Amino acid sequence: MTVDPSFRIAEIDKRLYGSFIEHLGRAVYTGIYQPGHPSADEDGFRKDVIDLVRELGVPIVRYPGGNFVSNFFWEDSVGPKENRKARLDLAWRTTDTNQFGIDEFQKWCKKADTDIMMAVNLGTRGTADALNLLEYCNLNTDTTYAKMRRANGHPEPYGIKTWCMGNEMDGPWQVGHKTAAEYGMLAAETAKAMKVMDDSLEFVMCGSSNIKMPTFPEWERVTLEEAYDYVDYVSLHQYYGNPAGDTADYLANTLDMETFLHTVECTIDYVKAKRRSTKQINLSFDEWNVWYHSMDKDNEKMAREPWDQHPALLEDNYNFEDALMVGLILITFLKHADRIRIACLAQLVNVIAPIMTDENGKAWRQTIFYPFYQASKYGRGIALECPLASGKHDTSGHTDVTDIDATAVYNEEKKEVTIFAVNRNMMETVELDCDLRAFGNSLRIGEHTEMAGYGINEVNSSADDRRVAPKPVADPADALSDGSYKTALKPLSWNVINFRIEK
């Protein structure tokens, strides 16, 4: 592997390490918000959760959905709590009390050191409602909704800059599902009108809900031809799982992610060329994660017990191989940092999440917490193109899968370079030989950790259970010598190797 600071892909947008909170399951209630909990602050926010969110360094959080947003009446979620209306959530067949809403979320985001990525309801509502919500959140005018915000005790505008034009509108499961042409026109008109109100906004247009949608990538082409001039990003959503118990093929799924990314990038660029435009539209991979452990149980529960309040849904308990998969996805994102400017790990707390809470106990870290935390900590700066020669293997569903998938990030400000590497060979240790001569003799080994040697189904199950976590690696004295660094990557391992740059 060659690591050279002049082989630049792009500067990494910090929003690559974003996340997502939906009014689904226990993400909000008993997740980020639980008045009366021992850790709750004066606003009912769980401080133990805020501490872990801050530890992850999440710069932006998408809200309030997800499928939930397509029947969201935002007015019910603001104002005096005793006057708020409970509503049925048609997406997840539950009841939302609206005791936590937009005003609470913006306050929570300030405490968690993160920004809001707001989604608007283009399912059951539309342009007029989006404009009212924008006025409520961002304007300081003497008009109805800005006055409503001030009357609700929030004199200063929230200044939300990134807005999602609905959610998964290509999906027949979505309330208010549209055809590509219908959605493209609606997204264009809504974004255009919102820009009149605030021309500093960025807009994310719904792309395909996953790579297997029958309309992919025609959906992207048609919607972009309607909305190209008014939007800034196309969204991508994709979840991975291993229901067949085939670890080797599961860890090869980032090859499919590469295909997904390449196809969407090419479709965007085709429309750009066709329109003879100079505007560059980039990607917002605003839903991604592992999701499969809880699906059957959740479907049964929603059918058997509809309209419950914040039931436990989508509470996947992640194992070691899921942590490897998350690491591989993050490596893929860094390789596409020139086009992926936003990404949202879905979701943040309790619902397919790195952070879990016990309702009567503590918040804790799942296995997938750690690769995300380390990428967020060290993956800031310049993404580097790193030529890599690796052995390959075939799986049941993929061919020519590299044993090692790796990338590197150069942080000029902090004077460090970090290698992220996964060995997805199930049996063999692989020696990684890094050519670092471009840095001269200025490198010193900083932190070197690995997640390795665990059973693929091993999990963390409580705040006191941190058995699956990164462990320090003691490099031999000659591991870094004459611009070369050599280390052994164990079978099925996530590795983070940080170097300090000294004069």
Image: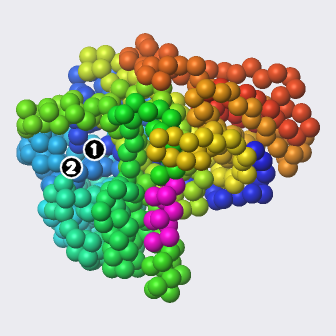
Residue drawn where x is 60% and y is 33% of the image: 425
**Residue type (three-letter) at the residue carrying disc 1:** Glu
Residue drawn where x is 12% and y is 42% of the image: 93
Near mark 2 (Cα within 10 A), the count class, few <14, some 14-19 or many ≥20, is many
Residue 177 versus residue 229 in the image, above or below: above
- Mark 2 or mark 1, which is nearer the start of the sequence? 1
Residue 372 versus residue 339 in the image, above or below: above
Name the quarter where the N terminus is drawn: top right
**Residue type (three-letter) at the residue carrying disc 2:** Phe
Tell whether 383 sits left or right of 118. right
Residue 313 coordinates in the image, percent (x, y):
23, 33
Magenta stretch: includes residue 457: no
Q: Is residue 178 visible?
A: yes
In the figure, residue 310 lies in which quadrant? top left
Name the quarter where the C terminus is drawn: top right
Secondary element at image label 2: helix
Near mark 1 (Cα within 10 A), the count class, few <14, some 14-19 or many ≥20, is many
Residue drawn where x is 27% and y is 50% of the image: 66
Quickly name the residue at label 2: 68
Rounded to the nearest angstrom, the CA distance separating label 1 from label 2 is: 7 Å
Q: How many marks?
A: 2
Magenta stretch: includes residue 260: yes
Q: Are dots 1 and 2 in contact, CB under 8 Å?
A: yes
The secondary structure making up most of the magenta span is helix
Q: Nearer the viewer, residue 162 or 419?
A: 419
Q: Which residues are magenta?
A: 257-267
